Amino acid sequence: MATRTTSHRTVGAAPAPNWDYSAAPEKIPVVIADRYDLFINGRFVSPRSKRYFETTNPATEAKLADVADGGAADVAAAVEAARKAQPGWAKLKATERAKYLFRIARRIQVRALDLAELETLVG
């Protein structure tokens, strides 16, 4: 029997095998903390506003966590910390800055499935 290809499938060909997929090797169980603070100047700090907002799973409406609600004073503190850190960052050789950026990108890549799962939960 001859086969012909359409835009969506091959007609007259053998059915595709049933593939079993293993879990991704980088899969680490997602742990959601009860509360998340702001990350400013290399450390986690409570918001100056003392306010947090609740995030929920839209599918179940179950509470996921409380997240810091940064206000104008928190943004100003973060901007000031970045301004102070920038000269030291600029003094690093480009190859050293690249190493930091690569490490950050790699950490994101390793946790991509977890980030996607969390994005879906708080969607």
Image (spheres, rainbow, N blue to C red):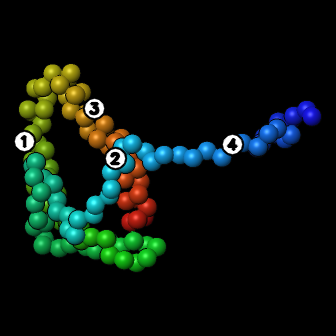
Q: Residue furthest bottom?
A: 61
Q: Amino acid at mark 3?
A: Phe
Q: Amino acid at mark 1?
A: Lys
**Which of pointers 2 and 1 indicates the residue nearer the eye?**
2
**Residue holding disc 3:** 102
Helix, strand or loop at disc 3? helix
User: Is residue 73 in sight in this rendering?
Assistant: no
User: What's the CA distance linking mark 2 and mark 1?
Assistant: 30 Å
Helix, strand or loop at disc 4? loop
Q: Earlier in the sequence, mark 2 or mark 1?
A: 1
Task: Assign the N terminus to one quadrant of the image.
Answer: top right
User: What's the CA distance linking mark 2 and mark 4?
Assistant: 30 Å
Q: Amino acid at mark 2?
A: Arg
Q: Are marks 3 and 4 in contact (CB under 8 Å)?
A: no
Q: Earlier in the sequence, mark 3 or mark 1?
A: 1
Instruction: Determine the residue positioned at 43% across, 45% down.
Output: 24
Task: Assign the C terminus to one quadrant of the image.
Answer: bottom left
Instruction: Determine the residue positioned at 46% across, 73% down.
Output: 59
Is the residue marked by circle 1 packed among few (<14), some (14-19), or many (20+) residues within 10 Å? Answer: few
**Residue holding disc 4:** 17
Is the residue marked by circle 3 packed among few (<14), some (14-19), or many (20+) residues within 10 Å? Answer: few
User: What's the CA distance linking mark 3 and mark 2?
Assistant: 14 Å
Q: Earlier in the sequence, mark 4 or mark 1?
A: 4
Task: In the rendered view, tell whether residue 26 sits above or below residue 63.
Answer: above
Q: Position of residue 67 (x, y in %)?
A: 23, 67
**Residue holding disc 1:** 84
Q: Are marks 3 and 2 in contact (CB under 8 Å)?
A: no
User: What's the CA distance linking mark 3 and mark 1?
Assistant: 23 Å
